[in-house]
Image (cartoon, helix red, strand yellow):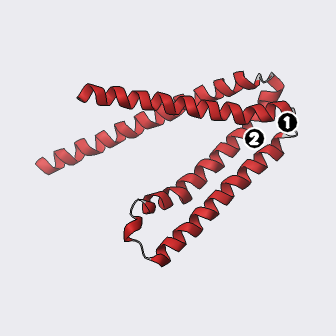
């Protein structure tokens, strides 16, 4: 009986944690949309044409990262126990994934040429980099506060 209660509590905890992660992802996505829209100063017409293209790019990029790069990074953590053959296979997988990500970026730029003026396409890269930098800094601060409270 104890094990059943423990199991149920563990499942509920995982669902709550997963739900919180989903909510955080949605909040980040909303903040990113607002940030990029403001930085690019998108008109209504530009936004209507831009966001479907950009969202498709983001989804494709996330898919490559989750399906291809995540297993590579996980295996890299244990690289000392890999054979040379396994390491070569990981390197090949990493090259394939990075090549796909690069091609997705090229396709995004090509697709945006018919949607946005060239200056805004250039601003997009800067805005995306700036948003990611601010997000990373905020996450770092949150970790430091959380770890500071434990000490």
Q: Position of residue 88 (x, y in %)?
A: 53, 73
Q: Position of residue 140 (x, y in %)?
A: 43, 32
* The one of 63 and 117 positioned closer to us in this rendering: 117
Q: Which residue is mark 2?
A: 53
**In screen coordinates, is 41 left or right of 5?**
right
Q: Which mark is residue 115?
A: 1
In the picture shown, does residue 39 fall above or below 71? above
Picture quadrant where residue 134 is located: top right
* The one of 62 and 119 positioned closer to us in this rendering: 119
Q: Earlier in the sequence, mark 2 or mark 1?
A: 2
Q: Residue at x 70, y 21 (%)?
A: 38
Q: Position of residue 6 (x, y in %)?
A: 18, 45
Q: Residue at x 82, y 40 (%)?
A: 112
**In screen coordinates, is 63 left or right of 73?**
right
Q: Is disc 1 surrounded by few (<14), some (14 to 19) or many (20+) residues within 10 Å?
A: some
Q: Residue at x 57, y 62 (%)?
A: 94
In the picture shown, does residue 9 fall above or below 96? above
**In screen coordinates, is 28 left or right of 129?**
left
């Amino acid at each position: 009986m104890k094990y059943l209660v423990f199991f149920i509590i563990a499942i509920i905890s995982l669902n709550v944690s997963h739900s919180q992660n989903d909510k955080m992802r949605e909040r980040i996505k909303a903040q990113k949309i607002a940030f990029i829209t403001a930085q690019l100063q998108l008109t209504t017409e530009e936004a209507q044409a831009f966001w479907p293209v950009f969202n498709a790019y983001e989804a494709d990029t996330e898919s490559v990262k989750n399906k291809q790069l995540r297993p590579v990074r996980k295996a890299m953590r244990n690289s000392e126990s890999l054979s040379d053959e396994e390491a070569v296979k990981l390197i090949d997988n990493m090259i394939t994934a990075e090549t796909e990500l690069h091609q997705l970026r090229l396709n995004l730029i090509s697709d945006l040429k018919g949607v946005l003026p060239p200056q805004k396409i250039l601003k997009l890269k800067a805005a995306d980099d700036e948003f990611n930098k601010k997000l990373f800094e905020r996450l770092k601060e949150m970790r430091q506060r959380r770890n500071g409270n434990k000490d």
